């Protein structure tokens, strides 16, 4: 019998599905000789899963919870880890190897029981929530977690939530109480204390069990340590075998990465393609993704959750207004004396437990105060701002200082995004230098007007709208940038399709 084969008393689980009765029927091989053979391997294996609790999630994906040693683990029924456990269980009980077809047949039966007869539970990756507590999976062999409540944090042996893992997850250190967030400052070569405050704010947001989460866009010259910075920030929340990665090829690869990780970190982007910007916006705010499952014609793979995201690159990564609206953008400075990376990471590893403790203290304060926070003028990503505002006293911050730092960052990002949008700049030039400081007309008339504001090489660019339909789409994207500068933008569809853009002194009739 392998370790954990018998369900310890503390693992008694009312969600366990009764296993099928063991097949005791015998089949006569040779009636004359009276020979008999053992029950099929499939039936033997299913009979050995009495200690397994079968369940499914909202997408009807089957999971198994089983004891191993002194703890219990949660894995997909069709995953590699559960297959290995079943194979080992069969060997230890019978001394033989399970056949491939028998193993596959057993998994199909267990999957059907989990989906049809098992209870439904919410499953979490790295960070879960139950009642009024947040649970952070430490990722250690004992499957312990940190429980954060409004009164503090503690390590618990058996978290009450279904925290699932992927093979790429790596353990977090056990947090130490009494740490100060200022210890992180030596590892973060940002330009100002306000930028450091925003980095910490992103970390606090990433420790919440649900989004929306701002995208952390990291810029800086070559050699400013963007990759090392991104690796360290991710390791504070969600260590991984591959902490920073290249941009995925398509939506499906992005969804697979999001399903197996809590934090996504994409390294060394030269630009953000249109499809990726749209996907990151949806992933930051929790919009759903749907893609066809492999080897099927009709089955869909559904992913509906938000994820904290880090992107880094030399050039600006938030040129699109929708992505800029959902981002916190910081710039790293060149370090006058760059430390060897191995020394830097070793010092960071020593400080990580204390930094984690300081972050968990702030999350505890946020849980205690979140219901009392009121924002007078909620900005975009208001849930993020409200959460960090509630956590601010736990970090020793003045709440107004964080709100001022975030507002200034928003203004800087908005201005940079405005300058990168040729259509927005041309419309602004039309309003501020033309004979009239307003425009009212059709998209075709607006295209003629803005064409006169830009040189010929710009009009010939593939990025410049070539017809009224393309311009209409670009105006919709530029509207938030123009409003940030005080303009009023309205589109009317009664009669002719009219676009009206005014400077602030005008008002609509």
Image: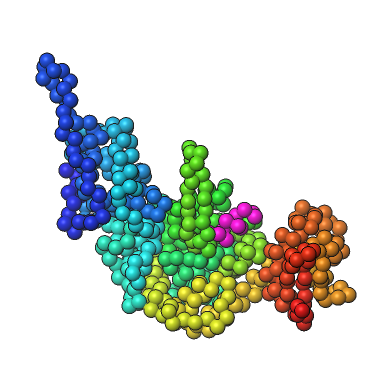
Magenta residues, as a range? 273-283
Evaluate whether residue 94 shows in this view: yes
Residue 386, above or below 234: below
Please name the predominant secondary structure of the magenta segment in the image: helix
Between 440 and 54, which is closer to the camera in this rendering? 440
Give the residue at the far right of this rendering: 435
Residue 258 vs residue 345, the one in the foreground: 258
Work out which residue is located at the far top of the displayed protein and give it. Answer: 32
Colouring scheme applied when the structure was drawn: rainbow
Name the residue: 76% across, 59% down: 471
Question: Is residue 207 covered in magenta?
Answer: no
Above or below 145: residue 115:
above
Left or right of 437 in this view: 202 = left
Q: Quadrant of the N terminus?
A: top left
Question: Can residue 190 be seen here?
Answer: no
Q: How many numbered discs? A: 0
The residue sitting at 47% across, 81% down in the picture is: 373
Residue 86 picture location, percent across and down:
27, 41
Name the spot of residue 226 as percent of width and height, x first. Answer: 56, 62
Residue 33 position in % (x across, y down): 11, 17
Residue 247 in the image: state x and y as whole percent: 56, 52
């Amino acid at each position: 019998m392998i370790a954990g084969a018998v369900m310890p008393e503390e693992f008694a689980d009312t969600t366990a599905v009764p296993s099928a009765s063991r097949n005791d029927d015998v089949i006569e091989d040779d009636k004359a000789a009276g020979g008999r053979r053992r029950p099929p391997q499939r039936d033997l294996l299913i009979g050995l899963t009495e200690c397994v609790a079968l369940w499914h999630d909202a997408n009807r994906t089957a999971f198994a919870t089983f004891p191993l040693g002194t703890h219990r683990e949660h894995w997909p029924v069709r995953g590699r880890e559960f297959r290995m456990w079943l194979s080992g269980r069969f060997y230890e009980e019978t001394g033989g190897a399970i056949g491939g077809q028998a193993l596959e047949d057993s998994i199909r039966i267990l999957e059907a029981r989990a989906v049809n007869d098992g209870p439904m539970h919410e499953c979490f990756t790295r960070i879960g929530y139950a009642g009024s507590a947040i649970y952070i999976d430490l990722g250690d062999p004992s499957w312990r977690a940190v429980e954060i409540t409004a009164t503090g944090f503690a390590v618990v042996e058996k978290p009450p939530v279904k925290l699932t893992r992927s093979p790429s997850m790596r353990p977090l250190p056990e947090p130490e109480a009494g740490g100060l967030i200022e210890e992180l400052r030596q590892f973060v070569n940002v330009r100002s204390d306000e930028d450091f405050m925003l980095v910490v704010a992103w970390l606090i947001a990433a420790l919440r069990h649900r989004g929306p989460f701002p995208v952390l866009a990291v810029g800086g010259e070559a050699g400013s340590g963007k990759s090392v910075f991104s690796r360290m920030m991710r390791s504070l929340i969600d260590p991984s075998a591959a902490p920073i990665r290249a941009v995925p090829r398509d939506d499906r690869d992005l969804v697979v990465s999001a399903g197996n990780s809590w934090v996504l970190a994409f390294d060394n982007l030269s630009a953000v393609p249109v499809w990726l910007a749209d996907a990151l916006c949806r992933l930051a705010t929790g919009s759903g993704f749907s893609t066809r499952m492999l080897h099927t014609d009709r089955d869909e793979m559904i992913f509906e959750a938000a994820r904290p995201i880090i992107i880094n690159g030399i050039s600006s990564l938030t040129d699109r207004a929708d992505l800029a609206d959902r981002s916190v953008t910081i710039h790293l400075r060149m370090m006058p004396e760059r430390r060897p990376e191995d020394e830097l990471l070793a010092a960071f590893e020593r400080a990580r437990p204390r930094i984690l403790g300081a972050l968990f203290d702030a999350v505890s304060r946020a849980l205690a105060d979140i219901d009392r926070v009121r924002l007078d003028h909620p900005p975009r990503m208001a849930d993020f701002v409200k959460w960090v505002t509630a956590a601010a006293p736990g970090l020793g911050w003045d709440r107004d200082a964080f709100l001022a730092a975030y507002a200034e960052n928003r203004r800087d990002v908005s201005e940079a995004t405005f300058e990168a949008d040729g259509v927005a700049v041309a419309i602004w030039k039309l309003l501020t230098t033309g004979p009239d400081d307003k425009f009212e007309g059709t998209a075709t008339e607006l295209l003629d007007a803005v064409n006169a504001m830009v040189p010929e090489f710009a009009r010939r660019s593939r990025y410049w709208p070539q017809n009224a339909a393309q311009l209409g789409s670009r105006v919709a994207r530029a509207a938030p940038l123009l409003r940030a500068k005080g303009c009023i933008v309205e589109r009317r569809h009664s009669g002719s399709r009219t676009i009206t853009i005014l400077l602030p002194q005008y008002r609509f009739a």
